[in-house]
Image (spheres, rainbow, N blue to C red):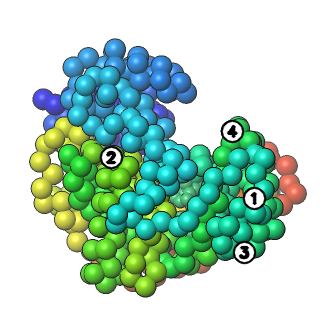
């Protein structure tokens, strides 16, 4: 039986999803995690996941005879790649995975690459004149930290003075995130067009596109709140082919060879340009809606790919699906979320979850890096799914107290009323 080491925080529900997938695929799993023992794990290796190099070393020592090391989240993929290299396993090289974790390194690696269109960019250090750099790149520009995620600190600036202000704000956001406020910032040209997310799978460097998600809400800034994801894409066939080609060129340019990739692109008049590529699947909440031939989950696809078991018949299982990431409209304290029952009753809605407790502090973009919660939907056509998600969204009413003090948190799903 193939054996795989899985780097995963045990507290995420994705650990359970992966263990279920392993059972279905007939794969033995060793959980590598720094959290408390997972109740479902047969075997577990405890690591200090905060120290990437040390965790990789310890994992390579303790994992025993494994066929692959798979990282589940952004942090785990680096540990997995380093451990796999130590074990001599044929996976994506650690340098390639590291490039996906640093937006400046990614842009540099892809600069001038045939088949990859990307915006003009410069990297700004702490003493650089960002207004002058933005003028050089050509406004409008987008200013962002190289290391954060979930649109945190990503700001559009329409002129050089706004770019300088955005850079100062990015540095404050970096400090609040516990990162170096003097760290590099990326200043890049604003890419017009619609945005898509590509879910792909690499096998020996060859990319298979599993799904393309449309993001039907315009994302024009100044902050970039993710909301709707709907698959399959409604873009025309030739545009989808160009998206697949650009994604393949980007993964090759970065040196990725094996495992899942999640890419984001902007498409202007049929021509795709690359925003970024991650060496992991789409966040679990959106991935949950995907089902492949024979009812295979995304987690099972990932494990089978890692174990080099056949993943043929990977065509999506038919129909359309999607997710809504519920944005945080303003910063403050979450007092109430009303309308959950109505939102869940919308035809096509498979689930609505609020992930912030009542009484908890919430922070809007660009400072915040979380969402209020998620909704999932499925239906016959993408338009049905989009309509269902919008109807569920409209049914929800969120009360945020801008000057309140956080209090003892209460689960929204427990049905608490507002104070
Ligand atoms: N150069 C750009 N042009 C247009 N939009 C951009 C650009 N860079 C980022 N964005 C917008 O901001 C979002 C988040 O930026 P991204 O670089 O993907 O960082 P993150 O790691 O936070 O997802 C993107 O999904 C896109 O909507
Ligand atoms: Mg992104």
Q: In the rendered view, does 225 fall on the left or right side of 331?
A: left
Q: Residues within 10 Å of mark 1 (few under 14, many from 20)?
A: many
* Res. 395 in view: no
**Quarter of the image where the N terminus is located:** top left
Q: Which mark is residue 54?
A: none
Mark 4 — residue?
179
Q: Which residue is drawn at 28% across and 22% down?
A: 87
Q: Is mark 2 on a helix, strand or loop?
A: loop
Which one is in front, 319 or 346?
319
Q: Earlier in the sequence, mark 3 or mark 2?
A: 3
* Res. 86 in view: yes
Labels 2, 4: front one: 2
Q: How crowded is mark 4: few (under 14 residues within 10 Å), some or many (20 or more)?
A: some
Which one is in front, 77 or 19?
77
Q: Residue at x 45, y 40 (%)?
A: 98
Mark 3 — residue?
158
Q: Distance between the residues labelled 1 and 2?
A: 32 Å
Q: Distance between the residues labelled 3 and 2?
A: 34 Å
Figure quadrant, ligand 1: bottom right
Mark 1 — residue?
130
């Amino acid at each position: 039986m193939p054996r795989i080491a899985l780097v995963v925080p045990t507290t995420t529900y994705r650990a359970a999803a992966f263990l279920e997938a392993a059972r279905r695929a007939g794969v033995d799993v060793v959980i590598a995690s720094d959290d408390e023992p997972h109740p479902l794990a047969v075997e577990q290796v405890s690591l200090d996941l905060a120290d990437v190099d040390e965790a990789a070393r310890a994992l390579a020592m303790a994992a025993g005879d494994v066929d692959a090391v798979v990282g589940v989240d952004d942090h785990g993929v680096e540990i997995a790649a380093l451990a796999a290299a130590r074990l001599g396993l044929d996976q994506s090289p650690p340098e390639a995975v590291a490039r996906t974790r640093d937006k400046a390194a990614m842009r540099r690696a892809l600069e001038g690459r045939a088949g990859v269109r990307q915006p003009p960019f410069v990297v700004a250090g702490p003493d650089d004149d960002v207004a002058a750099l933005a003028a050089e790149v050509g406004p409008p520009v987008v200013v962002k930290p190289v290391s954060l995620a979930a649109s945190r600190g990503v700001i559009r600036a329409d002129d050089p003075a706004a770019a300088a202000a955005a850079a100062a704000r990015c540095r404050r956001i970096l400090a609040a995130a516990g990162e170096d406020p003097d760290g590099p910032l990326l200043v890049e040209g604003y890419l017009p067009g619609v945005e898509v997310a590509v879910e792909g799978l690499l096998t020996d460097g060859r990319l298979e596109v599993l799904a393309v998600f449309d993001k039907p809400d315009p994302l024009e800034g100044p902050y970039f709140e993710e909301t709707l994801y709907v698959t399959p894409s409604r873009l025309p066939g030739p545009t989808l082919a160009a998206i697949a080609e650009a994604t393949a060129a980007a993964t090759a340019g970065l040196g990725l060879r094996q495992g899942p990739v999640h890419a984001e692109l902007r498409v202007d008049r049929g021509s795709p340009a690359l925003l970024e590529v991650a060496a992991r699947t789409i966040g679990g909440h959106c991935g949950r809606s995907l089902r492949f031939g024979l009812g295979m989950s995304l987690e099972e696809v990932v494990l089978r790919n890692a174990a080099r078991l056949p993943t043929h018949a990977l065509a999506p299982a038919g129909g359309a699906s999607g997710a809504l990431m519920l944005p945080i409209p303003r910063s403050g304290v979450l007092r109430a979320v009303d309308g959950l029952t109505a939102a869940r009753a919308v035809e096509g809605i498979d689930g609505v979850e609020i992930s912030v407790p009542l009484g908890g502090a919430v922070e809007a973009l660009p400072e915040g890096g979380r969402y209020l919660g998620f909704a999932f939907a499925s239906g016959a056509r993408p338009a049905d799914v989009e309509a269902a998600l919008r109807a569920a969204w409209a049914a929800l009413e969120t009360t945020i107290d801008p000057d309140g003090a956080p209090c003892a948190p209460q689960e929204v799903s427990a049905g608490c009323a507002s104070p």
